[in-house]
């Protein structure tokens, strides 16, 4: 892994189709998240069709960015805690158990959105990630995600 590889670049192909973060989903957001010290960062440029009120981004987009930024952060944090390379096996795979978003101000659609995350807690199979969303340096949303390692029988 190089310093600027995104976490999502290391997702195995069989879990790389997520609408928010899968690099193999041509219709998805394909977000890219990296470490910046103890924080994780995603920068995303909304598209004109992500409109809510004209000029502003749809809240569901913001929630989606927080969601996948946080599950990626959870995986990266577990690798970091264990001192393991993100391509090493067994792979850490996280899904969202809980997603909480506070929308503080409208998020402009015509400027890049920056999501910054911090790991609040790692306990067993659970990682809690807190995020802040900014546009042009202005805080527009806050998020908290509980991410849980995907069980073997996921979806059964
Ligand atoms: C990087 C290199 C490669 C890595 C490779 C990565 C691949 C990365 C995969 C890509 C994918 C992306 C994913 C995108 C984000 C989605 O969009 S994921 C899709 C939406 N989410 C889902 O469909 C999940 C559906 N829910 C479930 O399957 C199950 O409820 C869950 C989440 C697996 C949890 O079930 P469980 O395993 O039975 O959990 P359980 O043992 O009861 O609880 C474990 C802990 O979590 C807590 N918890 C469970 N549910 C909740 C809840 N709803 N609220 C709060 N806490 C909860 C429990 O309290 C417990 O905490 P502690 O008591 O230990 O403190």
Image: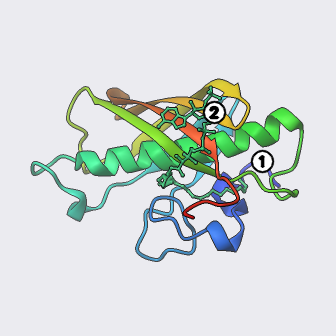
Residue 92 disc label: none
- Residue 67: give x, y in percent of width and height: 46, 45
- Quadrant in which the C terminus is drawn: bottom right
Residue at the (81%, 37%) spot, across then down: 80
Check contact, mark 1 vs mark 2: CB within 8 A: no
Can you say whether 90 is above or below 14 in the image? above
Q: CA distance from mark 1 to mark 2?
A: 23 Å
- Residue lying farthest to the left in this orientation: 54
Q: Is mark 1 within 8 Å of ligand 1?
A: no
- Residue 71: give x, y in percent of width and height: 57, 45
- The quarter holding residue 19 reads bottom left
The residue closer to the viewer here, 105 or 55, is: 105
Residue at the (50%, 74%) spot, across then down: 25
| Secondary-structure class at tag 1 | loop
From the image, tell me which residue sits under label 2.
127
Categorize mark 2 by other alpha carbons within 10 Å: few (<14), some (14-19), many (20+).
many
Residue 4 lies left or right of residue 139; in this view the side is right
Categorize mark 1 by other alpha carbons within 10 Å: few (<14), some (14-19), many (20+).
few
């Amino acid at each position: 892994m190089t310093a600027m590889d995104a976490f999502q670049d290391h997702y195995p192909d069989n879990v790389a189709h997520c609408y928010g973060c899968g690099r193999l989903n041509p219709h998805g957001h394909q977000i890219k998240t990296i470490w910046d010290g103890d924080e994780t960062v995603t920068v995303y440029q909304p598209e004109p069709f992500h409109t809510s009120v004209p000029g502003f981004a749809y809240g569901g987009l913001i929630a989606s960015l927080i969601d996948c930024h946080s599950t990626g952060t959870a995986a990266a944090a577990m690798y970091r805690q264990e001192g393991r390379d993100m391509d090493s096996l067994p792979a850490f795979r996280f899904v969202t158990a809980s997603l909480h978003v506070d929308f503080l101000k409208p998020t402009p659609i015509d400027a890049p959105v920056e999501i910054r995350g911090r790991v609040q807690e790692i306990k067993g199979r659970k990682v809690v990630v807190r995020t802040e969303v900014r546009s042009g340096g202005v805080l527009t949303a806050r998020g908290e995600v509980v991410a849980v390692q995907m069980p073997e029988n996921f979806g059964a």
